[in-house]
């Protein structure tokens, strides 16, 4: 059983922010990880990268990731903690 979900957010100003969501009562690990996925899919949108010119030229894949819908940064991951 785990007591919290921690979301790792990298803000565009370079700061790393840890958002903690506490569970009462504790939940099992698989439910916690599923809630982390749901949170990420709700609060952010995935992008494969910036277009490299006209359509068909491909993408800059170094910029792919989960971008927060409020435009402040990216979701880097999540973990469950006691």
Image (cartoon, rainbow, N blue to C red):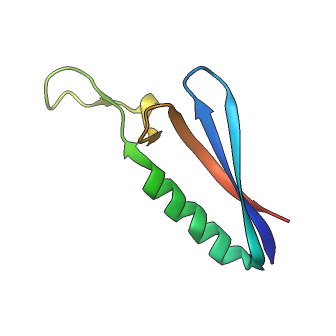
**Where, quadrant-wise, is the N terminus in this rendering?**
bottom right
Outermost residue on the front side: it is: 24
- Determine which quarter of the picture holds residue 25: bottom right
Outermost residue on the right side: it is: 82
Outermost residue on the left side: it is: 55
Count of numbered marks: 0
Residue 75 at x, y percent in the picture: 55, 43
Which residue lies at the image location 53% right of the left edge and 59% below the top edge? 39
Residue 27 at x, y percent in the picture: 73, 78
Look at the picture and state if 28 lies above or below 18.
below
73 or 77: nearer the viewer = 73
In screen coordinates, is 39 left or right of 49? right
Residue 6 at x, y percent in the picture: 71, 54
Which residue lies at the image location 47% right of the left edge and 51% below the top edge? 43
64 or 31: nearer the viewer = 31
Look at the picture and state if 35 lies above or below 12.
below
In screen coordinates, is 50 left or right of 5? left
**Where, quadrant-wise, is the C terminus in this rendering?**
bottom right
Residue 49 at x, y percent in the picture: 36, 33
In screen coordinates, is 36 left or right of 81? left
Which residue lies at the image location 62% right of the left edge and 49% below the top edge? 77
In screen coordinates, is 49 left or right of 5? left
- Determine which quarter of the picture holds residue 3: bottom right
Which residue lies at the image location 40% right of the left edge and 33% below the top edge? 61
């Amino acid at each position: 059983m785990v007591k919290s979900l921690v979301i790792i957010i990298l803000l565009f100003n370079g700061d790393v922010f840890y958002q903690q969501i506490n569970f009462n009562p504790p939940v099992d690990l698989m439910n916690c990880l599923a809630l982390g996925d749901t949170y990420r899919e709700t609060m952010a949108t995935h992008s494969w990268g910036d277009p490299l010119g006209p359509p068909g030229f491909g993408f800059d894949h170094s910029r792919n990731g989960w971008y927060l819908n409020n435009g402040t940064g990216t979701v880097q991951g999540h973990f469950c903690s006691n």
